[in-house]
Amino acid sequence: MKIAFIGLGNMGGGMAANLVKAGHDVKAFDLSADALERAAGNGCETFTEAKEAVAGVDAVVSMLPNGKIVDAVYSGDVIGHAPTEAILLDCSTIDVATARKVAGDADGAGYAMVDAPVSGGIAAADGGTLTFMVGGAADAFARADPILSVMGKAVIHAGDSGAGQAAKICNNMLLGASMIATCETFKLADKLGLDLQTFYDISSKASGQNWSMTSYCPVPGVGPQSPADNEYAGGFATALMLKDLRLAMEAASGADADVPMGGRAAELYEAFAEENGGLDFSAIIKSLG
């Protein structure tokens, strides 16, 4: 299958490489010359114009920073330039309204499209073990599923257009809040004189167990390998967590939803990101006394 991949950053680069490994002909575009060079090294054919990359393909996959860019790329470079038979898959994390607007534009021009944001971070993108939350019509999902399955361990149809973004925003609001609670708990355990490995051994098997503790422990040397063991480098950047929490707050406001824990998590990450946006989001433990 000929697949155009637009957006070759920390996530997109690994995703495109996995499509090549699966035997697909990947036509890659990014504004960064370094990203294009890495993509070429991974077996992609590279282009300096998105319109050229999408010509004659069977599918278009995008992984872009925000909704404004997604809208601009699809309206200016994809719709009307890719074949109408191509399935469009946007894997960016953006606001629900823009996801639905772009999908509507695509549908009006004769394209099938899904929003398919991911969970899993850079390691999962490189390893092909992402989780995709997919919004779109059932027939569009059926066409997108084989492509997404190459890049992920789980592909879940969340509902109609925008549902994938809604699921991602809700999931990451929960993740942000639970990471802060996990960090607070380890800090308290330490001040109460508990050995942190012992506390981990107890809580990871008790009712307080959660993903932030057992799969992504914010304490160096405790639990499985995590960014905490690499001075909080790599993983899921604090700036990206803040972006998702801002989207969640925007969505909550629009839906008249009461999210006090999510709101407090957004406030704490807002303050922490001012000087630590490049660190993994679990590094917020450093801000707690």
Image (tube, rainbow, N blue to C red):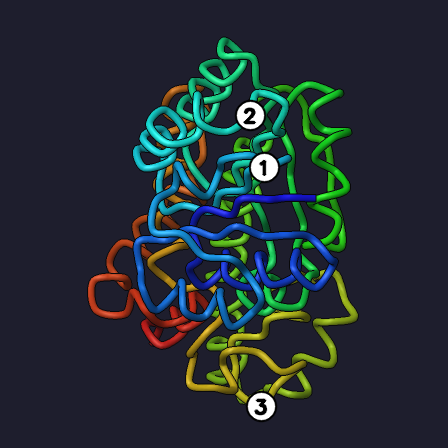
Give the residue pinned by disc 2: 83
State which tag comes first along the sequence, 3 or 1.
1
Asked if the residue under mark 2 is in contact with the one under mark 3, i.e. CB atoms within 8 Å, the reply is no
Residue found 60% across the figure and 58% down from its top: 120
> The residue tagged with tag 2: helix, strand or loop?
loop
* Amino acid of disc 1: Val
Residue found 27% across the figure and 70% down from its top: 276
Front tag of 3 and 1: 1
**Residue 285 coordinates in the image, percent (x, y):** 41, 73
State which tag comes first along the sequence, 3 or 2.
2
Q: Is residue 281 above or below residue 257?
A: below
Q: Is residue 177 above or below residue 285?
A: above
Give the residue pinned by disc 3: 221
Asked if the residue under mark 1 is in contact with the one under mark 2, i.e. CB atoms within 8 Å, the reply is yes
| Residue 80: quadrant of the picture | top left
Give the residue pinned by disc 1: 57
* Amino acid of disc 3: Gly
Residue found 49% across the figure and 43% down from its top: 62
Front residue of 125/28: it is: 28
Q: How crowded is mark 3: few (under 14 residues within 10 Å), some or many (20 or more)?
A: some
Image quadrant containing the C terminus = bottom left
> The residue tagged with tag 3: helix, strand or loop?
loop
Furthest residue to the top?
108
Asked if the residue under mark 1 is in contact with the one under mark 3, i.e. CB atoms within 8 Å, the reply is no
